[in-house]
Image (cartoon, rainbow, N blue to C red):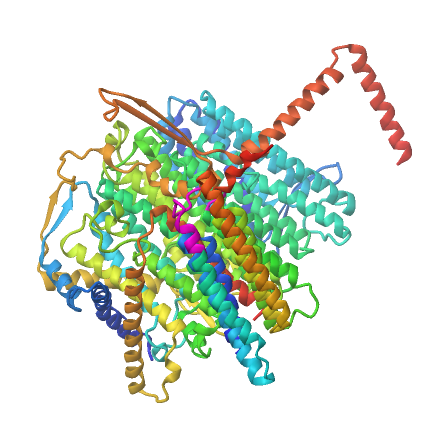
């Protein structure tokens, strides 16, 4: 690497992705080789990306500018800017992309002969490339173009299996919502240009008046919020993620929604420079609501991928809580709290990509083995797919923020940041921060409940259907991809200091304050100075104590009680004999207490159909169906859609008369109006 | 004090005293009901008896079932390390704070819920789903109240919080601490599965929450689960009494004599707390499952009000 | 001393939360009794202090009045009146209890935001006590709104009166005696009339569910 300049590494990376796309297209007739080369090249590109971004974060100081295309049209050029913020997100993209590529070696083999795998890989490689461009765009026009390409490619990937109706519907909702958000971004960019006459993202925003900055903030918030899945702009997520193939879902949930976080950081923190504290408080409030509602809806799902999609909404909420605290603190001038909160948000972004990506990959493995996405039909898979089960367990523990995995460290940092933002004399912020602490605790406990349900119903107990009886372990490449992610989860949990030092470099670049000094504490410890006294946690020490106690207990038991005899027998059945799988708890039953407690939110609908047998006390068949009401769609979007439909049909009668003369008249009037505008302005 | 001797003292004290707390509670309950009740050391004998017996494991169960008792005990003991029995023995800069405490206990609870589902029995699933609901409703109260104390003490490390509370005269007469104490009493009852949230002595499966999850365990695995639950109970009691009834400021001497006296005073407080729990258990009834949210809402309000009284209303 | 008053004001607020979280008729009356006892304690402590410092006994007398009326006489009266009514537990609510409790918490925040703008109030101690007491008034009113049976309205009215009394007590450490007497006489009259009316309604309609009074529309 010595002779290479950093820019060349990134160019090579782009070439490799392009090469992967091309080779996938060329080798369509030979799916096996096409798959191998495409993902092999993607893997190489990902490795390069990891190395380059690590280098950028640790060694290289100044941002890199790479100018690819200078066209004759002013303001339109393809130039990339890779500074520390971009490098961090590229690191996340590359790590996740690499593991997903390894996974795809085995996963896509099941599609050979049934689907056009070459086309799929072509779209896939270009999708990653477009995300790379979004993360490194240097001017707003190129950012917009890359954003659009990313949305379009992900749409094609979502509707790849387009013969199923729900996939079509998912794609439609997705493309409409994402374009809605993008239009807000467009207005924001146009405002940007009208005040500064330039699209350069690294330039200053000093010439923009205060009110315009507020308006731009709201526009960017809506635009990026739609892509991130913030409530109430989230309705596309639960449709789009389940419709796509699992490796694409992993990428979408792991990275694509994080590009919105990148956008918020780049535009609001970097460009608009945080005018007011209420910006941060708005983000905090939105994050709070998304965290609680996201996991509340996830609890009620029993389609694995929809469940995971709702969980992404929850985690975006947690990231927004961190960002909100950071923005508020930085706007008020509390640099240390702001830097810690920023570090918490960025670390959670990275962690979420790891464990959510892993969970989607595991869901794909489950789907391949059992041909169903419904966890009510699974069960007992821990004996048939032991390694996948272990990996899914690790990811479930990580996402529930359980010691000693990485989710815990980022939530701990978020808590500390919230505490740091509470101080005397600011009633509004104190109340929202306390509510955010309560919301984090509540969503964490609900997430644990949800993943106990997911893991317990899918993997434990007796198989509930034929699907689960004949499941087989996933192929080795899929296990390797997931295993790498799981290993990283554990590593980030046990040695968070290394990752936090990297993130701190990003924080220094953005805010000018380093927290690495406060993050001392030796190997494996993270300490955060809250005023004078230091608070530190040491996940590896806790892990060591737990393992030590476990071993000591085992040894002591052997000494005190002799080698214990264990007898295997059927589960206790109250003497009725023949427990079968229908008697165990189902997913719907598991979440019933919470469904009843939160019934004001869910408004569950119940249907009970009973076929009586010889006596009303011994029915032949009972069918029970429970459903939760989609509040946002019913009360927010449907009325809006009806309004638009009514307006459009009225307009249709008046305007689209079908007469050629009217249409010519419209063109004539428009030309006159434009010429008048030119005269007046 | 260096960390390894601190850890040793903590683990030994808490492991030794935990079954005694259960004994005191049962004896007190029996005395209020005009019965003689089991001897105070009954749980030690019970644990010893269970160790001798062989275990029957369900055929449906997997490695999670056999691993859970060790994990439950390990997490309870790891939590015990974080809550000092006396402020005189805390080593400087010991890592670990109250948030870590909550999430270490969450690990034990996660595996206990999984073990309930592992055997494919209905009662286990029922216990797990009820436990999921109760723990989800109680967690906000724990964190808001602990973090309020942490904010006042300017640190979330448990040792630092205890040291800061030592300087407050009569915490229970101070409105903020009184509110947080009441909230934490409700949390203690919920987390240790005591009346009014769950009955630890019930034989009816339909009324069980914690007992339903350990229903399938026998032999030494049951001993580990029971011991783990007792250790967790003592950890929460220690947190409560050492924060809100600090005793170390009454000691005037120094040296190892002071440490011994401090630990003895701590044991006295634990006995008082155990009797208090027994009194609460005998004077209330177990709530219907769907009345538990009312209690949880009350606990949350108490802790949130405590936060408000301090940070918004300005004390 | 100020610390005890703070703790008492907080406990009075907590008792009003406990009142909202309850479903049993006997618990309503018992919680009201407890709240009145706490108020009597507050008045007693203030009375002792004013006796020591200024030699006035009126606050102490007021405290004793509260004990005899609100702790002993009125709860017993309520218990006797409602001993003849059929039910013991309320099962039917407009909004479920946890939501009501959370709304009450919002009321506390709201009364803080409203009162903190009054000039001269920000003298630390008085601020918190006054906010707590005004919240008791609001919570009493919410209790009246949220309960369907007549006992809810009666106890709610009494809690509102408690809250007003304790607001005045905390902000002025004692009102003119004649004002206190006037309030007490009003309150006794209202309770007696309500008690008699409820008895008659129960006799006539065999139910004291006020929600069904809607049927009496003309």
Q: Quadrant of residue A107?
A: top left
Residue in view at x 31 percent, y 66 percent: B235
Where's the C terminus of chain A, which quadrant?
Answer: top right
Where's residue A448, x and y in %? 38, 48
Residue A673 vertical position relative to residue C8 in the rendered view, above or below: above
Q: Which residues are magenta?
A: C78-96
Q: Is residue A439 magenta?
A: no
Closer to the camera in the image, A619 or B128: A619
Q: Position of residue A675 (x, y in %)?
A: 88, 27
C131 sits to left or right of A541: right
User: Can residue B308 be seen here?
Assistant: yes
Residue C79 belongs to magenta span: yes
Camera-nearest residue between B207 and A400: B207
What residue is at 31 percent from the left and 23 percent from the top? A610
- Residue found at the very far bottom of the displayed protein: B253
| Quadrant position of residue A594 | top left
**How far across and how far down the image is residue A148, in percent?**
61, 34
As displayed, is residue A24 above or below residue B298? Answer: above
| A334 or A52: nearer the viewer | A334
Residue at image point 25% right, 27% down: A466
A552 lies left or right of A45: left
The answer to whether residue A229 is above or below residue A556 is above
Residue A169 position in % (x across, y down): 51, 25
Please identify the dominant SS of the magenta region. loop
- Residue B278's place in the image compared with A663, above or below, is below
Foreground of the two, C48 or A81: C48
Answer whether residue A318 is visible to the viewer in this image: no
């Amino acid at each position: 690497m010595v002779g290479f300049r950093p820019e060349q590494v990134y160019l090579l990376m782009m070439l490799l992705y392009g090469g992967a796309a091309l080779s996938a297209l060329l080798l369509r007739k030979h799916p096996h080789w096409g798959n191998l080369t495409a993902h092999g090249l993607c893997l190489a590109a990902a490795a390069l990306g990891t190395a380059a971004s690590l280098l950028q974060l640790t060694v290289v100081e100044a941002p890199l500018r790479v100018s690819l295309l200078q066209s004759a049209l002013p303001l339109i050029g393809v130039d990339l800017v890779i500074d520390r913020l971009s490098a961090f997100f590229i690191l996340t993209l590359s790590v996740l992309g690499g593991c997903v590529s390894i996974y795809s070696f085995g996963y896509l083999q099941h599609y050979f002969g049934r689907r056009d795998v070459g086309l799929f890989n072509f779209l896939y490689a270009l999708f990653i490339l477009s995300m790379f461009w979004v993360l490194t765009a240097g001017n707003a026009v190129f950012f917009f173009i890359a954003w659009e390409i990313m949305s379009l490619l992900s749409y094609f990937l979502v509707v790849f299996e387009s013969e199923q109706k729900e996939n079509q519907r998912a794609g439609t909702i997705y493309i409409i919502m994402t374009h809605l958000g993008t239009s807000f971004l467009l207005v924001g960019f146009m405002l940007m240009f009208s005040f500064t006459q330039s699209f350069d993202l690294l330039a200053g925003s000093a010439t923009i008046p205060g009110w315009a900055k507020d308006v731009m903030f709201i526009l960017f918030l809506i635009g990026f919020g739609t892509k991130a899945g913030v409530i109430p702009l989230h309705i596309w997520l639960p449709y789009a993620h389940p419709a796509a193939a699992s490796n694409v879902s992993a990428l979408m949930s792991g990275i694509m929604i994080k590009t919105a976080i990148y956008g918020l950081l780049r535009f609001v923190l970097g460009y608009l420079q945080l005018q007011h504290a209420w910006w941060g408080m708005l983000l905090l409030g939105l994050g709070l609501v998304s965290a609680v509602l996201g996991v509340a809806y996830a609890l009620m799902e029993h389609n694995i991928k929809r469940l995971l999609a709702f969980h992404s909404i929850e985690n975006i909420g947690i990231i927004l809580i961190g960002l909100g605290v950071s923005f508020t603190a930085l706007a008020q001038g509390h640099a240390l709290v702001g830097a810690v909160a920023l570090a918490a948000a960025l670390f959670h972004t990275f962690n979420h990509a790891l464990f959510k990506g892993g969970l989607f990959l595991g869901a794909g493995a489950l789907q391949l083995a059992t041909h169903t996405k419904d966890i009510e039909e699974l069960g007992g898979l821990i004996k048939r797919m032991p390694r996948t089960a272990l990996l899914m367990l690790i990811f479930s523990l990580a996402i529930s923020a359980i010691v000693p995995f990485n989710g815990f460290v980022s939530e701990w940092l978020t808590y500390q940041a919230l505490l740091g933002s509470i101080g005397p004399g600011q009633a509004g912020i104190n109340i929202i921060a306390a509510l955010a602490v309560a919301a984090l605790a509540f969503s964490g406990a609900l997430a644990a409940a949800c993943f106990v349900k997911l893991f317990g119903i899918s993997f434990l107990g007796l198989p509930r259907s034929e699907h689960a009886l004949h499941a087989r372990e996933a192929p080795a490449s899929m296990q390797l991809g997931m295993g790498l992610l799981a290993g990283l989860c554990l590593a980030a949990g046990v040695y968070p200091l290394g990752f936090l030092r990297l993130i701190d470099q990003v924080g220094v670049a953005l805010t000018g304050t380093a927290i690495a000094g406060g993050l001392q504490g030796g190997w494996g410890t993270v300490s955060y100075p809250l005023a004078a006294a230091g608070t530190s946690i040491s996940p590896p020490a806790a892990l060591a104590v737990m393992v030590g106690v476990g071993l000591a207990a085992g040894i002591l038991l052997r000494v005190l009680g002799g080698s214990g005899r264990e007898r295997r027998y059927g589960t206790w059945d109250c003497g009725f004999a023949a427990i079968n799988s229908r008697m165990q708890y189902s997913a719907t039953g598991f979440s019933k207490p919470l469904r009843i407690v939160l019934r004001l939110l869910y408004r569950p609908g119940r249907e009970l159909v009973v076929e009586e047998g010889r006596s009303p006390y011994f029915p032949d068949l009972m069918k029970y169906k429970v459903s939760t009401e989609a509040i946002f769609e019913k009360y927010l979007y449907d009325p809006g859609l009806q309004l638009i439909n009514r307006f459009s049909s009225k307009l249709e009668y008046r305007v689209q008369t079908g007469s050629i003369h009217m249409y010519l008249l419209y063109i004539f009037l428009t030309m006159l109006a434009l010429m008048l505008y030119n005269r007046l302005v | 004090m260096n960390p390894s001797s601190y850890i040793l003292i903590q683990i030994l004290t808490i492991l030794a005293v935990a079954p005694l707390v259960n004994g005191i509670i049962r004896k007190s309950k029996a005395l209020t009901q005009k019965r003689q009740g089991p001897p105070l050391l009954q749980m030690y004998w019970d644990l010893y008896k269970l160790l001798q017996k062989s275990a029957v494991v369900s055929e449906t169960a997997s490695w999670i079932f056999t691993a859970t008792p060790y994990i439950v005990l390990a997490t309870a003991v790891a939590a015990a390390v974080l809550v000092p029995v006396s402020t005189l023995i805390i080593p400087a800069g010991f890592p670990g704070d109250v948030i870590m405490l909550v999430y270490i206990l969450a690990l034990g609870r996660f595996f206990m819920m999984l073990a309930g589902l592992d055997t494919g029995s209905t009662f286990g699933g029922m216990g797990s789903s009820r436990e999921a609901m109760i723990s989800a409703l109680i967690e906000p109260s724990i964190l808001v109240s602990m973090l309020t104390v942490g904010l006042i003490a300017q640190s979330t490390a448990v040792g630092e919080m205890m040291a800061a509370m030592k300087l407050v005269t009569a915490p229970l007469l101070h409105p903020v601490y009184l509110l947080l104490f009441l909230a934490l009493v409700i949390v203690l009852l919920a987390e240790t599965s005591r009346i009014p949230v769950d009955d630890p002595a019930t034989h009816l499966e339909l009324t069980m929450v914690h007992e339903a999850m350990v229903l399938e365990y026998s032999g030494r695995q049951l001993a580990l689960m029971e011991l783990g639950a007792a250790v967790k109970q003592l950890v929460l009691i220690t947190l409560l009494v050492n924060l809100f009834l600090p005793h170390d400021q009454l000691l005037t001497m120094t040296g190892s004599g002071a440490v011994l006296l401090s630990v003895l005073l701590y044991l006295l407080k634990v006995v008082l707390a155990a009797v208090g729990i027994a009194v609460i258990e005998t004077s209330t009834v177990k709530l219907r499952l769907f009345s538990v949210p009312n209690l949880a809402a009350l606990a949350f309000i108490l802790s949130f009000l405590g936060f408000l009284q301090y940070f918004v209303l300005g004390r | 001393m100020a610390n005890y008053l703070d703790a008492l004001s907080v406990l009075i607020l907590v008792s009003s939360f406990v009142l909202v979280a309850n479903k049993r008729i006997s618990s309503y009356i018992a919680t009201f009794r407890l709240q009145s006892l706490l108020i009597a304690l507050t008045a007693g402590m203030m009375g002792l202090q004013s006796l020591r410092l200024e030699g006035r006994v009126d606050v102490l007398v007021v405290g004793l009045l509260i004990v005899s009326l609100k702790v002993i006489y009125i709860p017993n009266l309520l218990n006797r009146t409602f001993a003849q009514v059929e039910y013991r537990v309320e099962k039917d609510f407009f909004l479920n209890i946890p939501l009501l409790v959370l709304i009450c918490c919002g009321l506390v925040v709201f009364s803080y935001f409203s009162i903190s703008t009054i000039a001269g109030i920000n003298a630390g101690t008085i601020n918190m006590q006054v906010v707590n007491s005004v919240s008791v008034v609001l919570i009493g009113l919410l209790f009246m709104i949220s309960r369907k049976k007549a006992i809810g309205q009666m106890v709610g009215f009494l809690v509102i009166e408690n809250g007003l009394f304790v607001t005045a007590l905390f902000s002025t450490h004692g009102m003119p005696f004649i004002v206190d007497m006037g309030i007490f006489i009003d309150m006794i009259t209202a309770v007696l009339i309500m008690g008699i009316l409820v008895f008659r309604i129960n006799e006539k309609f065999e139910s004291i569910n006020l929600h069904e009074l809607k049927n009496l529309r003309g």
